[in-house]
Image (tube, helix red, strand yellow):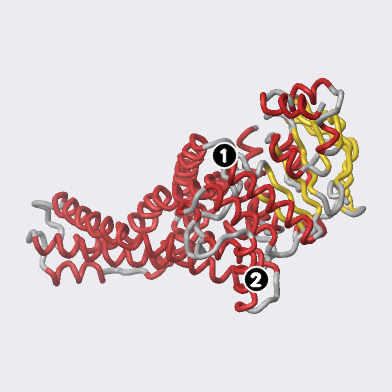
Amino acid sequence: MIEVRNIVKSFSENIILNDVSFDYVHGKTNLVIGQSGSGKTVLLKCLLGLYTPDSGSISFNGSDIVVLPTNELKSLRKQVGMVFQGGALFDSLNVEQNVLFPLEMFSDMSREEMLERVNFCLKRVNLENVNYLFPSEISGGMKKRVAIARAIVLNPKYLFCDEPNSGLDPYTAILIDNLLQELTHEYGMTTVINTHDMNSVMEIGENILFIKDGRKIWQGTSQDILIASNQDLQNFVFSSELFKTIKAKSI
Amino acid sequence: MGLIASFGKYLLFIAEVFRKPERRSVMYRLVVKEVFELGLKSVLFVVFVSLFVGAVVTLQTAANMEGSWMPRYLIGYATRDAVILEFSPTIISLLLAGKIGSNIASSLGTMRVTEQIDALEVMGVNPATYLVRPKIFALIFFNPLLICLSMFVGVIGGWAAGVLTGECSSSEFIDGIQYDFIPFKAVYALIKTVLFAFIIASVSSFHGFYTQGGALEVGRSSTRAVVFSSVLIIVTNYLLTQILLG
């Protein structure tokens, strides 16, 4: 369980997150939606401890990471997997070495066991025969899948994804969404996904948080979203013709 | 004030770099990799530059001695001292600040803007220790070897230029490089080399590590890294010469 209470984060005079509070549900895909620049990525980086909030608390199973000593924060991070927007794969390492990296740093497995685990994770994200390719030699969708394989290789309790299907074609985007949802249920992880893709919201959104201008506006499920009365949410969700049609049909 | 704040940030960065690494075995492997990437890949460049500059020093010394009463073996003597005291440790380090420094700053800068450094941090790996320490160790270990090679090749270049142009005979040049040799001068040169290696690796890493923005800022970080490393090398060179030879 991740509990966020009253967090405020600003850069110079700019308030990016303003008194945001909510809970992420364990074992579910939790989505954070909002327009570009609404504070989603800053919120995610606060959750990861990459940014320290100006005030408020962020608790992972009762441990407040804002005040957690560095050593304990590092131990907690070993339970966290992260898929960055661009994948953030290490350019100098090939696919296999990228996925192997967390194991080499933190596990006591033998080399054979590590490679077995790497191949299992690559297979799990539907990637085979790409072990020796470098990030510059694979497509955007493959990069995202390698990043997911790297994120789950240590069996994390928490998985964070920053716009995992941005820049991908609709088919690959749906594959990535479904993969993330399957993995969430399979490993019993608490998954947090930043997105502004409404397809993702409808496909995998089990607990959705909508933020605007750094404030929490609405929280609910993908079923609730179609009937929510909040005007800001309505403007965001039904900005596309497709969703206007879906709404009309559902009514 | 900005400079003082940057210096403070640099000191904190260095403290972070020398924290205990997550895995020592990984660290050893990374040092070897950096020796190859930063050191061995510079060997040809250093050999080429040293050979020609040694030759130029010899020809210039010979030209200045033209028609004078001074013995020709002094050409070898002057070349040796110029190469060992200043040319190899300082000028080659300045050139390496350009070659290696820009490489370090741009690669770390790119890692920063593509969130690879954030990825390390999220995994619980100390990025400063993991990325920067191997570079510092590799350069401190390998630069003295590179500079020794440069000294040797520079003197060879001088000898070849002197003999081939007929400015001095081979035996005169060899007499010159043996004349009044003080071993401490080589020690002084190597002390400088170690400090310059630390400056190149740490200052360039610092600028690359804290890059913010995109490709343009990576380029700026790279330029800043070379400028600051070069200025610090020049100032440190003066201070060390004053302390050790003054």
Q: Amino acid at mark 2?
A: Arg
Determine the chain carrying the residue at label 1. A
Residue B147 in percent (x, y) is at 37, 63
Residue at point 81% right, 30% down? Answer: A226
Residue B182 lies, with reference to residue A184, above or below; the image says below
Label 1's element?
loop
Q: Earlier in the sequence, mark 2 or mark 1?
A: 2
Q: Residues within 10 Å of mark 1 (few under 14, many from 20)?
A: few
Residue farthest toward the right in the current orientation of the protein: A62
**Camera-nearest residue between A30 and B150:** A30
Q: Quadrant of residue B23?
A: bottom right
Mark 2, Cα crowd under 10 Å, few <14 / some 14-19 / many 20+, is some
Kind of residue at disc 1: Gly
Point out residue B171 in the picture as x, y percentages from the top left corner: 14, 72
Mark 2 highlights which residue? A117
Question: Residue at 34% of width from left, 58% of height from top?
Answer: B88
Whether residue B20 sits left or right of residue B149 in the image: it is: right
Q: Position of residue A157 (x, y in %)?
A: 80, 58
Q: Does residue B170 appear to the left or right of B17 in the view shown?
A: left
Name the residue at 61% across, 66% down.
A100
**Quarter of image, res A146:** bottom right
Residue A11, labelled with which disc?
Answer: none
User: Mark 1 = which residue?
Assistant: A167
Please indicate, yes or no, whether residue B77 appears anywhere in the rendered image. Answer: yes
A53 in relation to B50, above or below: above
Q: Say which of B120 and B105 sits in front.
A: B120
Say which quarter of the image contains residue A98. bottom right
Calculate the distance from the C-alpha at mark 2 to the C-alpha at mark 1: 29 Å
Residue B162 % position (x, y): 14, 61
A151 on left or right of A63: left
Front one among A63 and A162:
A162
For the residues bearing labels 2 and 1, Cβ distance under 8 angstroms: no
